[in-house]
């Protein structure tokens, strides 16, 4: 893309060069106006090339900064997720341990309490539709 911009800049800056050369040959320009026009065009073209190059460099820098910020944000999110998951896991383990201890003689109530806590659909054994025998 940068190459195309540079080519376009060259064409914009020097489209009239062949015309000036023909005019200079026809008129035998002795005052140096054609040469002066060519020098101004050359300076303009150089400025445009520098601006295009600088814009490309700035774009790469800002893209790199954005990528670094993205990577850092993802790392922070992953760290926070891991920490929260560990905290939840400890709480959940403690909850399950207490329910098992409190309801060890009543497995249906134990299963119901655990299912309510974790959002699991609990089907009591007599309603499950499974035949035991």
Image: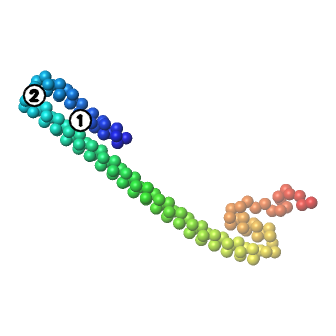
Residue at image coords 76%, 67%: 111
User: In the figure, residue 88 lies in which quadrant?
Assistant: bottom right
Q: Measured from the top left, where is residue 40 in percent x and y?
A: 17, 38
Say which of marks 1 and 2 sits in front. 2
- Residue positioned most to the top: 26
User: In the figure, residue 12 lies in which quadrant?
Assistant: top left
Q: Which mark is residue 90?
A: none
Helix, strand or loop at mark 1: helix
Helix, strand or loop at mark 2: loop
Q: Measured from the top left, where is residue 96 in percent x and y?
A: 70, 72
Earlier in the chain: of badge 1 and badge 2, it is 1
Residue at image coords 30%, 47%: 53
Image check: 62 left or right of 122?
left
Give the Cα separation between the discs numbered 1 and 2: 21 Å
Q: Quick check: 53 above or below 121?
A: above
Q: Quadrant of the N terminus?
A: top left
Could you classify mark 1 by the number of other residues whose Cα lies within 10 Å: few (under 14), some (14-19), or many (20 or more)?
Answer: some
Q: Measured from the top left, where is residue 8 in percent x and y?
A: 30, 36
Q: Which residue is mark 2?
A: 29
Q: Which mark is residue 13?
A: 1
């Amino acid at each position: 893309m940068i190459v195309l911009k540079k080519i376009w800049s060259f064409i914009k800056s020097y489209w009239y060069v062949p015309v000036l050369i023909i005019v200079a040959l026809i008129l035998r320009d002795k005052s140096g106006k054609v040469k002066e026009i060519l020098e101004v065009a050359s300076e303009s073209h150089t400025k445009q090339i520098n601006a295009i190059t600088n814009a490309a460099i700035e774009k790469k820098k800002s893209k790199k900064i954005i990528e670094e910020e993205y990577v850092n944000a993802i790392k922070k999110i992953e760290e926070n997720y891991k920490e929260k998951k560990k905290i939840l896991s400890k709480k959940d383990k403690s909850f399950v341990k207490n329910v098992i201890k409190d309801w060890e003689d009543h497995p249906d109530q134990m299963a119901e309490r655990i299912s309510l806590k974790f959002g699991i659909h609990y089907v009591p054994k007599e309603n499950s539709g499974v035949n035991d025998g």
